[in-house]
Amino acid sequence: MTNILHVSCSPRGHDSESHRLSEQIIAFLLERDPMAIVIDRAIGGGAVPPVDKDYAISQESAEDISQSGSADLSNRLIQELENADYVVVGTPVHNFTVPSTLKAWIDHIARVRRTFDVTSDGKVGKLRDRPIFIAVSSGGRYSGERARQPDFLTPYLQAVFGMIGLHDLTFFSVQGTAFGGDAVAAARSKTDQALRAYFASKQPASHGLDLQATARMQD
């Protein structure tokens, strides 16, 4: 059975543009594999708290010193990620990068000895690679000819997911949402076309979708 993990990060919940876009991606996945199970992990309202003291100390020690609190939550979040065949992350851009809610989730899943090891050659991921779709909404524009702000979100997510072994990232975005209804409609239309083109180019595999190809598709 195919599992799709949906991590929704906006404080606006279902009303957010990033949630709308992530739901579109999930709809394409379900169209190819109608029997897939979607696991919703809504974190936009602060459902994932910052890591606690014991968790932080354990990251600098030889072993985990606590299995309650942050460590217990971390175990559950990592298990969700490990069980997923596809991951869809819906996130806004906050101050040029990821929102604090997504950062808190990442702090729980990026865990030394559990999802990555530290070696003499650097950090080595321990997770099996799988397709990760990032659905981004942004009030400003951070890519393309009309970009007027820096983009720290994309390289950060590529680096931190890569650190734990996840390299197959595909980005879709709706940018310029602060410029009014016409700008949003135009951005949605362009991204909708990119979504249809992307999934039309992928052939279903016998076990579900065959999406093992890294891409970046931005508005």
Image (cartoon, rainbow, N blue to C red):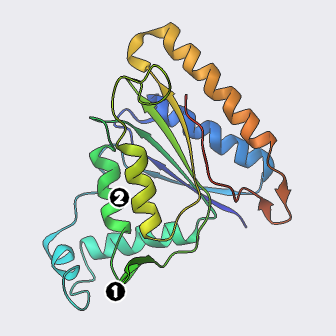
| 19 or 162: nearer the viewer | 162
Query: Mark 2, mark 1: which one is toward the viewer?
Result: 1
Q: Residue at x 69, y 41 (%)?
A: 27
In the image, 9 versus 125, the foreground residue is 125
Q: Does residue 25 appear left or right of residue 115 in this picture?
A: right
Q: Where the N terminus falls, by quadrant? A: bottom right
Q: Give the residue at x 47% y 64%.
A: 162
| Res 151 quadrant in image | top left
Q: Is residue 115 visible?
A: no
Asked if marks 2 and 1 touch (Cβ < 8 Å), the reply is no
**Quadrant of the snapshot with the C terminus:** top right
Please tell me the numbered disc located at residue 147: none
| Viewer can see residue 24 | yes
User: Which numbered marker is on residue 105?
Assistant: 2
Image: 123 above or below 119: above
**Quarter of the image holding residue 12?**
top left
Q: Is residue 198 above or below residue 63?
A: above
Q: Label 1, on which residue?
A: 120
